[in-house]
Amino acid sequence: MVKGIILSLFFSVFAFAKYTQEAYYVYGKQNLRYFAPYKELTIDHVTASGFEVYGPKGLGQFITRANIRAAVLDTKASITRAKYPTPEETAQRIQMAVSKFPQIAQMMSIGKSVKGRDLWVIKISKNVRVNDNRPEFKYIANMHGDEIMGRELMVLLIEDLLSNYGKDAYLTKLVDTTQIYILPSMNPDGAALIQRGNANWVDLNRDFPDFSEKGNDKNTLDGRAVETQAIMKWQASRKFQLSANYHGGAEVVSLPFDTVPDKFPLADLVNGLGVEYATNAPYIGASKVFKNGITNGYAWYEVNGGMQDWSWNWYKDLQITVELSNQKYPDPSTIPYYYQQNRKALIAYIARVHTINQSRMVR
């Protein structure tokens, strides 16, 4: 009771901004009850041993005053090996790949980050500049700047699809019949700074409209990060039917809903998609923590303002979340391993855009 009073008094000045200026690992899952009620805070990657908590400046003081055992999370301090490419180097690499295949690849900016970096989307499809009735699919990675593996896998997937077009019959047909959109980095500023939030410390995966959150239950751009706004405008302009977004810090496929305990309307379909992805990515399917390598998002931990639930609620774009690696910033030498482990799953999941309409609700 005393801890609850202390937290309430301390955070009364912070309104409801989802800032990530301070980050801690809190020991003991039982301490979750002291943090969960506060919308100012981001809870992440809950395990039996503890969880991550992110918040505005002063979070450390509030943890100290509450006498809760915790340790500072500092991604930058933990990185002692080779560095990953910069956002600019990544963009150059993608541009080089796209330039070799102008008939099936197009690179476009859907907006700018806080620091003016382009949010580059790559469209891969036969007659790439034509918008027609072929199913639209999207991948988004690197929403959290310090969760880097997704960005690297998206780059390799782009190169794989392009270089094997006309050589691999299955991939060629997939590209011919699908409009594939890939956003390797939603948060290039965060990637450059090696921090979770954007350049203004906003947690982008807590920044979307949320149908369960009073005051945030309208699909409006007002008050949101520029990166979030870019995604919202892009989504509204397209007809995506199936999507996935990539994170790090665990190895599991997380399924909607994230924000409420309600059963997802297409629970059987989405569970099947999750199991299939995890099975096709052997190290995820073999998880000793998550049965069959999947979890319901809310059952794991509540996420308010997440992109996954937003995309379904307002656009009926069915989306899953893939946590790729237990380390958010693993050694770059592991990139080929993670790609080979996920390659089959990445490709098979894209192909599912052609079959889900047989099982899902009418848009």
Image: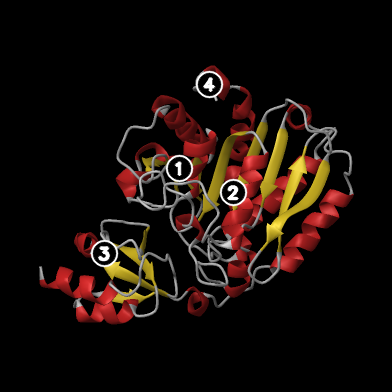
Residue at mark 2 to residue at mark 4: CA–CA distance: 22 Å
In this view, 271 is above or below 295 = above
Residue 67 visible in rendering: yes
Front one among 238 and 164: 238
What residue appears at the point 38 percent right and 52 percent down from the top-left corner?
303
Residue 209 percent location from the top left of the image: 46, 49
Q: Are marks 2 and 4 in contact (CB under 8 Å)?
A: no
Front one among 307 and 165: 307
Q: Are marks 2 and 3 in contact (CB under 8 Å)?
A: no
Q: Are marks 3 and 1 in contact (CB under 8 Å)?
A: no
Q: Could you tell me the amino acid type at mark 2? A: Met
Residue at mark 2 to residue at mark 3: CA–CA distance: 29 Å
Between disc 1 and disc 4, whose residue precedes? Answer: 1
Q: Could you tell me the amino acid type at mark 1? A: Asp
Residue at mark 3 to residue at mark 1: CA–CA distance: 22 Å
Circle 2 residue = 232
Q: Secondary structure at mark 4?
A: loop
Query: How many neighbours does mark 3 have within 10 angstroms: few (below 14), some (14-19), or many (20 or more)?
Result: some
